[in-house]
Image: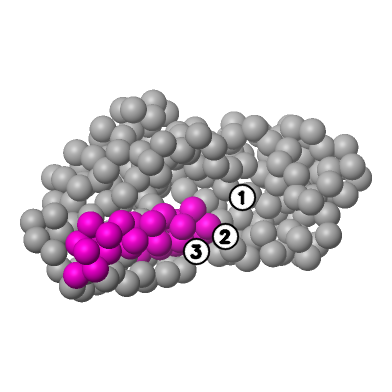
């Protein structure tokens, strides 16, 4: 199996960071029905279990949270909290919630974006959007080493010459996402792929590995 290679510098116009979010009242007294949402990504599921274990530890086992796992998008996660079906989101993304939940214009300054999101969630949803965990999650294009060698790919602009031949798979939310999604990408780089296949992010990696795609939009995490 070919090792997947990241060939692209970050294409986000606004940086995405991870943050926890909970509903008011959780800190006011223990509830035995605490539920934590997690997306179908490694970092989200890891953080969900870390939060679960921390709550169990801090309450001496009196509260044993459950995890609502493998949610397909940030929108589903957000609506789950709005309905009261969960009290904590293990991971939330400032860029996503800024343009999605808050319907705000994109902000490229990460500190300003965080400030707007935190105030917006408090005022609009009466929720607390906590500070970053200390690492960032961004979008990046990925290809296998075989594809990189075949098409001589080293940077984003190299993809333009092969835009009609390369099949792109992306997170389903990125295709229409304002500010740092596919429309912004096509405007910034001046080209479109002939074939774009939106899908759940976990399927993107499998499709790339199994040669059902040539290029994948994945997540890049760093501290």
Q: Provide the secondary structure element on which disc 1 rests.
A: strand
Residue 218's disc is 1
Whether the magenta-drawn stretch holds residue 118 is answered as: no
Mark closer to the chain start, 3 or 2: 3
Circle 2: element type: helix
Mark pair 3, 2: CA separation? 8 Å
Q: Quadrant of the N terminus?
A: bottom right
Q: Which of the two residues, 221 or 95, is positioned nearer the viewer here?
A: 221
The residue positioned farthest toward the front in the image shown: 60
Residue ID for mark 2: 201
* Tags 3 and 2 touching, CB below 8 Å: yes
Name the residue at 79% across, 33% down.
154
Q: Position of residue 31 (x, y in %)?
A: 15, 68
**x and y, in percent, of residue 46 in the image:** 46, 57
Indicate left or right for 7 with 203 as reference. Answer: right
Residue 172 in the image: above or below residue 85: above
Where in the figure is residue 112, as x and y percent of width and height? 31, 28
């Amino acid at each position: 199996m070919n090792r997947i290679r990241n060939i692209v510098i970050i294409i986000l116009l606004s940086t995405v960071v991870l943050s926890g979010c909970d509903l008011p009242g959780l800190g006011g007294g223990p509830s035995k029905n605490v539920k934590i949402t997690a997306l179908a990504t490694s970092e989200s599921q890891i953080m969900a279990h870390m939060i679960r274990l921390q709550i169990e530890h801090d309450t001496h086992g009196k509260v044993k949270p459950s995890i609502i796992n493998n949610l397909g998008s940030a929108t589903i996660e957000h609506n789950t909290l709005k309905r009261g079906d969960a009290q904590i989101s293990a991971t939330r993304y400032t860029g996503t919630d800024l343009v999605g939940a808050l319907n705000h214009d994109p902000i490229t300054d990460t500190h300003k974006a965080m400030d707007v999101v935190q105030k917006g969630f408090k005022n609009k949803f009466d929720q607390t959007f906590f500070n970053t965990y200390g690492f960032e999650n961004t979008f990046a294009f990925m290809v296998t080493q075989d594809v990189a060698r075949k098409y001589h790919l080293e940077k984003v602009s190299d993809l333009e010459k092969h835009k009609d031949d390369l099949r792109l798979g992306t997170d389903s939310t990125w295709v229409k996402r304002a500010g740092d999604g596919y429309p912004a990408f096509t405007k910034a780089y001046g080209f479109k792929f002939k074939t774009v296949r939106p899908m759940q992010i976990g399927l993107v990696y499998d499709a790339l590995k199994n040669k059902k795609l040539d290029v994948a939009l994945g997540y890049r995490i760093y501290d």
